[in-house]
Amino acid sequence: MAKHDGNVDKQRRMLLGAGIGGCVGAAFGARIEQVKAAATASAGDVLVYFKGDNAGLPIDPSGLQLLEPVLAKPQSPDGQVREARENVVTVVRVPMDEMEADIEDMAAGDIVAVSAICSHQGCFVSDVGTFGTAEGKLACTCHGSIFEPRAGGERVAGPAERGLPTLPVTIDGGQLVATGGFTGKVGP
């Protein structure tokens, strides 16, 4: 009869546990990435109103007024609104002759969509300033960061260290549709 060594059994159990744990961890990590991808704005998503009487309805690009921002959320092709806070978008019509050339391919004509989450502390950015440095620019009302919608959310002033990522959009069937995901990290 073979002699059993308790240390060998213990090592085998530890290795088996680590192997199973690693497989479960890898599978769980892959599932987390799938959930994150499903929760993030992507190509084909229709932008819908985030608040107000029209909440959940597709944004009508022809109804957007010059430099009057509208908060939106992406709705996936299967009709699911992407509810994560990081998906809130500020949509704004800007004067076409003032739009930066490098942002034109991400805009739907004169309509730009940028993250509505400030890169400083995560507050909503949805107001257009009316005086001084902020005039005609997106302003964070929490700490005063200012972003240029004509340049795709570029940081102009304030404590934020970087701009707002752009959500590339087009007009398709009279609706604003994302042509890709955000161009950078959303939020702080």
Image (tube, rainbow, N blue to C red):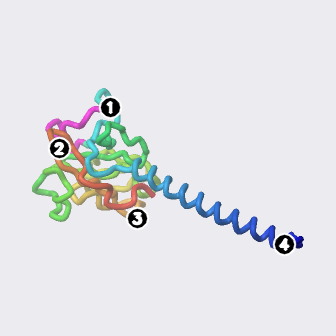
Residue 76 x/y as whole percent = 32, 42
Q: Secondary structure at mark 4?
A: helix
Q: Nearer the viewer, mark 2 or mark 1?
A: 1
At label 4, the amino acid type is: Asn
Q: Are marks 3 and 2 in contact (CB under 8 Å)?
A: no
Say whether disc 3 or disc 2 marks the residue closer to the N-terminus.
2
At label 3, the amino acid type is: Glu
- How far apart marks 1 and 3 lie (CA) works out to 32 Å
Say whether disc 4 or disc 2 marks the residue closer to the N-terminus.
4
Q: Nearer the viewer, mark 1 or mark 4?
A: 4
Residue 63 in magenta stretch: yes
**Residue at label 4?**
7
Q: Secondary structure at mark 2?
A: loop
Q: 65 or 158: nearer the eye?
A: 65
Drawn side of residue 188 relative to residue 18, left or right? left
**62 versus 129 height, above or below:** above
**Residue at label 1?**
55
Residue 160 x/y as whole percent = 41, 60
Q: From the image, which quarter does the C terminus lie in?
A: bottom left
Q: Which residues are magenta?
A: 55-68
At label 1, the amino acid type is: Ala
Q: Nearer the viewer, mark 1 or mark 3?
A: 1
Q: 48 or 15: nearer the eye?
A: 15
Residue 159 x/y as whole percent = 42, 60
